[in-house]
Image: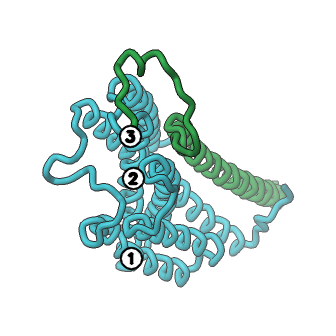
């Protein structure tokens, strides 16, 4: 039977899911019906409203993975490990979206899908670090040693995040700097609105993904402990499917 | 050197592009591909989470079955 607090948590989770879905519908309408077509690039510029927020979502996931891993190294708990793992998965999902949508935009803007530009290279490296983390977690087992090793990888891997951000300023390259402290390159207020909507949508989606995956990982950890207790009591938990 | 065309000429004549002077990639196709890719990645993640949830449910069911069997066995052993 559900406890009242559990029911409240479920309600909050479904409310967040509904809000995210509604925000995405509104964002698509904003992008295609309200934001104007860019004068030089044409309709393909509309990729920008999902591409930039997807990397922002990747930073949220990577930040969660870093914080969860750091906290786990300080004091190991299942919830901290679950949060780190959820963060890595969120980073990979959003990183994949960014790595697919970016080259599609580049094909039109640069005439090629990929160049070994500093921003692109460091972004790919970061994506691969989180893929490596997930592969490690999937195949190396669930003991404390493996969890600590993965946490260390996530903490070290986070060092690349500021490098991605500042690579354009430091080393130049082809990647544009549209969002800057001095106002940026979006010339129309509806373009700014569409981008702000994109950031909101991806914040909600990242929060939803982190929450969903953390809950599943925490439940998986509890179940594994109960199974171990059952085996200690002489109960055989291996039943036929 | 070619002379600039009058506005009427531009509006009424259509000339084929010779060689590879046109757009290399269609903006519309790239845009649709980008949004399709976003949806594919998102739904792939949802499917993955769904699979994990199903696996968790199966393990819970197995555990429940074992606990029920143990409880039944314990009840049978009790003297009436």
Q: Position of residue B39 (x, y in %)?
A: 56, 41
**Distance from the alpha carbon under mark 2 to that under mark 3:** 52 Å
Chain seen in green: B
Question: Which residue sits furthest right?
Answer: A240
| Disc 1: host chain | A
Which mark is drawn over residue B1? 3
Q: Earlier in the sequence, mark 2 or mark 1?
A: 2
A169 or A203, which is in the foreground? Answer: A169
Q: In which quarter of the view is residue A164 placed?
A: bottom left
Mark 2 or 1, which is nearer the eye? 2
Q: Position of residue A9 (x, y in %)?
A: 42, 42
Residue at 47% from the left image edge and 58% from the top image edge:
A95
Q: Which residue is mark 1?
A: A155
* Whether marks 2 and 1 lie on the same chain: yes
Q: In which quarter of the view is residue A119 placed?
A: bottom left
Find chain A in the image and tell me its colour: cyan
Query: Which quadrant of the rendered structure holds the N terminus of chain A?
Result: top right
Q: Which residue is mark 2?
A: A57
SS at mark 2 in the image = helix
Q: Is residue B46 above or below residue A85?
A: above
| Disc 3: host chain | B
Q: Position of residue B20 (x, y in %)?
A: 56, 45
Mark 2 or 3, which is nearer the eye? 3
**Distance from the alpha carbon under mark 2 to that under mark 1:** 18 Å
| Disc 2: host chain | A
How many numbered marks appear? 3
Q: Position of residue A181 (x, y in %)?
A: 16, 53
Residue at 52% from the left image edge and 56% from the top image edge:
A113
Left or right: A50 as drawn, with respect to A162: right
């Amino acid at each position: 039977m559900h406890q009242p607090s559990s029911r409240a948590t479920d309600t909050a989770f479904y409310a967040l899911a509904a809000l995210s879905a509604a925000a995405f519908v509104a964002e698509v309408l904003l992008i295609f019906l309200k934001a104007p077509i860019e004068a030089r690039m044409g309709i393909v510029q509309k990729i920008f409203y999902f591409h930039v927020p997807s990397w922002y979502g990747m930073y949220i996931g990577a930040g969660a993975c870093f914080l969860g891993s750091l906290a786990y190294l300080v004091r190991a708990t299942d919830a901290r490990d679950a949060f780190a793992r959820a963060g890595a998965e969120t980073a990979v999902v959003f990183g994949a979206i960014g790595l697919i949508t970016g080259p599609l935009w580049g094909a039109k803007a640069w005439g090629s899908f990929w160049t070994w530009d500093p921003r692109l290279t460091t972004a790919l490296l970061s994506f691969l670090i989180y893929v490596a983390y997930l592969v490690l977690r999937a195949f190396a087992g669930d003991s404390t040693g493996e969890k600590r090793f993965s946490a260390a990888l996530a903490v070290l891997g986070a060092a690349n995040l500021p490098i991605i951000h500042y690579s354009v300023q430091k080393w130049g390259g082809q990647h544009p700097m549209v969002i800057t402290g001095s106002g940026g390159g979006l010339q129309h207020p509806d373009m700014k609105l569409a981008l702000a909507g994109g950031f909101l949508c991806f914040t909600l989606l990242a929060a939803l993904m982190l929450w969903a995956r953390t809950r599943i990982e925490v439940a998986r950890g509890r179940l594994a402990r109960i199974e171990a207790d059952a085996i200690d009591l002489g109960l055989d938990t291996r039943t036929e499917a | 050197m070619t002379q600039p065309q009058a506005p009427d000429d531009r509006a009424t004549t259509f000339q084929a592009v010779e060689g590879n002077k046109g757009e290399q990639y269609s903006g519309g196709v790239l845009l649709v591909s980008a949004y399709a890719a976003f949806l594919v990645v998102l739904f792939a993640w949802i499917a993955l989470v769904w699979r994990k949830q199903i696996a968790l449910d199966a393990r819970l069911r197995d555990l429940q079955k074992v606990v029920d069997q143990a409880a039944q066995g314990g009840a049978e052993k009790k003297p009436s």
